[in-house]
């Protein structure tokens, strides 16, 4: 029998079950609620961890892409030379490969950029602020442009936003790692709680298991009954938790309502299908944890 056939047989066995073996597992009691509620809570948290992990990556990629496509030229020169140097910079940019557009920011635009930090009543016309030129392009040779500006317009300094991009990429990688670590911890907690529930059920059904052994039941037969019951409980609880988690993520404020700060804090596109994988994953985790716990407990059972 191939691996695929064995996996299919295991799935069918879990779905169909064995009525005689199922009697060894209590259909009600605290172990039922322990397993179902734990699986639901872990699935709910897993949905949020997954959504935050994907959203963080999308947000950092979007910021990095927008910064990579735009550079800024800062012109620091005396007031009487500032306009002449600005015109010289714009002429250089007209003949620079990779430049899609370039424009000098108006005084009002620079005031708007400084307003969040210095207030709305800033006398910008009295301050020796540098002139800013916004450059948008693709595959721009920043180093070559920087050298040309240094030779022709000494007062112009090119900023390609490398200082901004590097922290974003590093932060994104760390947050993604934290997100996946959280998912691993959630899976571990689910396995631990299901193991405790299975051990409690085994201890509560000592007499039933002893009778089954007396009539010739093997440990694998008894373990299979516990594995099936707890796997289905975990699947049910995880399905409910994943559904609630997905609805909660969908109910988060939109980009406009959040003022742009919570941009993308949800699933996007095919990402909405990922919560569907959480219940099967929880069932697999419960299957492995319960089977291992049951076989180890039965091996020590007298």
Image: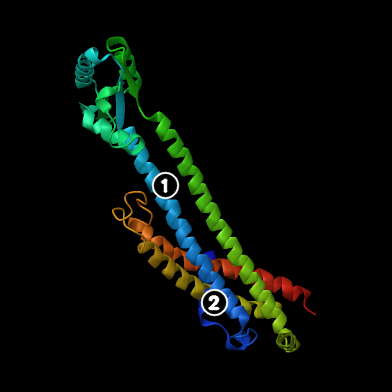
Disc with the residue nearer the chain's start (2 vs 1): 1
Q: What residue sits 62% from the left and 81% below the top? A: 30
In the foreground, 231 or 251? 251
The type of colouring in the image is rainbow
**Residue 188: quadrant of the picture:** bottom right
| Contact, mark 2 vs mark 1 (Cβ under 8 Å) | no
Instruction: Please give the residue where the numbered disc 1 appears in the rendered image.
Output: 57
Residue furthest out toward the top: 151
In the foreground, 74 or 100? 74
Q: Secondary structure at mark 1?
A: helix
Figure label count: 2
Residue 51 % position (x, y): 42, 56
- Label 1 crowd bin: few (<14), some (14–19), many (20+), radius 10 Å: some
Q: Vertical placement of 4 versus 56: above or below?
A: below
On the rendered structure, is 294 left or right of 146? Answer: right
In the foreground, 206 or 44? 44
Instruction: Please give the residue where the numbered disc 2 appears in the rendered image.
Output: 233
Position of the N terminus by quadrant: bottom right
């Amino acid at each position: 029998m191939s691996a695929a056939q064995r996996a299919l047989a295991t799935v069918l066995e879990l779905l169909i079950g064995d009525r005689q073996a199922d009697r060894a597992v209590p259909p009600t009691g605290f172990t039922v609620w322990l397993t179902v509620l734990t699986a639901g809570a872990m699935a709910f948290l897993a949905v949020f961890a997954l959504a935050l992990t994907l959203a963080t990556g999308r947000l950092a990629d979007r910021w990095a892409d927008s910064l990579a496509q735009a550079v800024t030229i800062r012109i620091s020169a005396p007031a009487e030379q500032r306009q002449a140097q600005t015109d010289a910079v714009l002429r250089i940019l007209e003949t620079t490969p990779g430049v899609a557009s370039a424009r000098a920011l108006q005084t009002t635009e620079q005031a708007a950029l400084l307003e969040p930090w210095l207030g709305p009543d800033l006398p910008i016309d009295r301050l020796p602020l540098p002139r800013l030129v916004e450059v948008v392009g693709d595959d721009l040779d920043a180093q070559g442009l920087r050298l040309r500006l240094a030779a022709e317009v000494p007062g112009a300094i090119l900023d390609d936003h490398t200082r901004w991009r590097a922290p974003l990429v590093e932060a994104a990688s760390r947050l993604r790692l934290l997100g996946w670590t959280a998912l691993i911890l959630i899976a571990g907690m689910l396995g631990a709680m299901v193991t405790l529930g299975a051990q409690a059920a085994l201890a509560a059904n000592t007499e039933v298991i002893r009778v089954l052994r007396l009539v010739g039941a093997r440990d694998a037969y008894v373990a299979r009954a516990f594995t099936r019951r707890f796997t289905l409980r975990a699947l049910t609880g995880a399905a409910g938790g994943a559904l609630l988690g997905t609805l909660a993520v969908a109910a988060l404020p939109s980009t406009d309502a959040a003022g742009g700060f919570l941009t993308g804090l949800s699933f996007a596109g095919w990402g909405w299908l990922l919560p569907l994988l959480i219940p099967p994953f929880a069932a697999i985790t419960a299957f492995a944890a319960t089977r291992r716990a049951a076989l180890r407990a039965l091996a020590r059972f007298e």
